[in-house]
Image (cartoon, grey):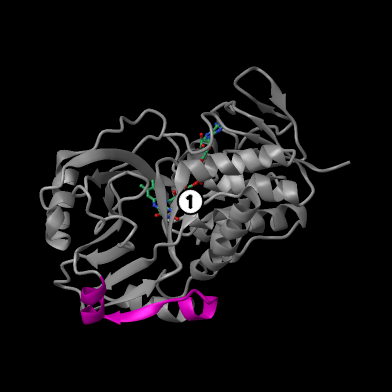
Amino acid sequence: MKTHIAVIGAGAFGGWTALSLLRGGAHVTLVDAWGPGNSRSSSGGETRIFRGAYGPNQPYTKMAARAGQLWKENEKRWNLKLLHQNGVLWMASPGDDQFERGSLLPLREAGIPYQELSVQEIAARWPQINLEGVQWGIYEPESGFLTARIACQEVLDGFVAEGGEYRQLAVAMRDLDGASWDSLSLSDGSKLRADQYVFACGPWLGKLFPETVGDHIRSTKQEIFFFGTPAGDDRFTDATLPVWGNHHERFMYGIPGNQGRGFKVADDTRGPEFDPTSGERTVSAEGLRTIRDYVAFRFPALKDAPLLESRVCQYENTPDNNFIIDRHPRHQHVWLVGGGSGHGFKHGPALGEMMAGLVLEDRGPDALFRLERFRK
Ligand SMILES: Cc1cc2nc3c(=O)[nH]c(=O)nc-3n(C[C@H](O)[C@H](O)[C@H](O)COP(=O)(O)OP(=O)(O)OC[C@H]3O[C@@H](n4cnc5c(N)ncnc54)[C@H](O)[C@@H]3O)c2cc1C
């Protein structure tokens, strides 16, 4: 008989984990309270950046390289486009370019194509950017952006088409650290019994496991703005502009207009604490002002661009921004996966593959991701 694994949470982490476990030969039940990429989840919204640059000494460039292969393999299998490779441009500031400098070796080692560009080369290619305060840049021509909630839905559709079982129900939000683990209670009154459980509940993970995870995942309010680009002008759409990131006083990033939506800009600075279930998703006047000032400075032609849409999402941050991938310390058949910390989405397929290996082959996770690092 096949091992039965229950995966709770159908976001970027849980969806890909469920699919990879299924492909690894398990019988998998995937459960989500509000559905894949729902507006409360950290995987909701239109787009996410796919990039290789991550600074020095980290596992994520390599993980992104593997994820990129898997995104493309699955695109082929499903005959659709999820990874849009319009490139990623990093604008490095003088005296504050450790991130960009430190990214070069990992990019090279992971085989992610990149070019080092002088400020003159950047100006020649993208004259619509004001390069004041920029000294040089990295361009990743094969990186770009992913469609977020659409991808989560496609992963679920693929999972169901390949024989996975999906139930849109909630696991009771109670302390699971002390649960008996005979079965899980679901919101329709039914019980779910499995051989192993994987909890990929994003910003909710600390609430479900208050003792084990608790404050090791903190949700912060993050605001995203979409501005209208000039009519008939593709200088600020993905037709000509790459995704971009800029360490300039704060870390600002954006995704050019795509699929008829506006020019997306966000400030990566961690916002105030935010409750993913009950938090009101309205952006602040202060956040809008900061973004408008930055847009006017860096993309002068968009100085008076109208705000088309805005969103509030939450990062689910760990203290060191590394993921949590571990067994529950007292319940060895329970796995905890999360802590995407504002950068997890792109890794979904690689993380899912890793999880399938750990769960099905009974292996231990890398020390970097284990919970015990918080006890040191
Ligand atoms: C504004 C913003 C920008 C970001 N930008 C990027 C980016 O550019 N690139 C990138 O790679 N990453 C980015 N990220 C990070 C990335 O989106 C997240 O790390 C990733 O989506 C987390 O996925 P997850 O599956 O862990 O969590 P989630 O997507 O939150 O999924 C958890 C799921 O669990 C379900 N759930 C919770 N509790 C229960 C329960 N009791 N019972 C049943 N179901 C439950 C929820 O409904 C939800 O669907 C960004 C995040 C935000 C918010």
Tell me where residue 117 appears, x and y as whole percent: 30, 80
Q: Which residue is at the front of the view, 233 or 49?
A: 233
Q: Does the magenta stretch include residue 156?
A: no
Q: Does residue 189 lie above or below 351 as drawn?
A: above
- Toward which corner of the image does residue 354 lie, by quadrant? bottom right
Tell me where residue 322 appears, x and y as whole percent: 48, 59
Q: In which quarter of the image is the N terminus?
A: top right
Q: Is residue 141 left or right of 347 when viewed as pictured?
A: left
Q: What residue type is labelled 1?
A: Gly
Tell me where residue 158 appears, x and y as whole percent: 65, 42
Q: Say what secondary structure mark 1 lies in.
A: loop
Q: Does residue 100 lie above or below 283 as drawn?
A: below
**Which residue position holds label 1?**
339
Q: Is residue 260 left or right of 112 when viewed as pictured?
A: left
Tell me where residue 111 appears, x and y as whole percent: 53, 77
Please give the range of residues in magenta: 107-125
| Ligand 1 within 8 Å, label 1 CB | yes
Q: Which residue is at the front of the view, 90 or 197?
A: 90
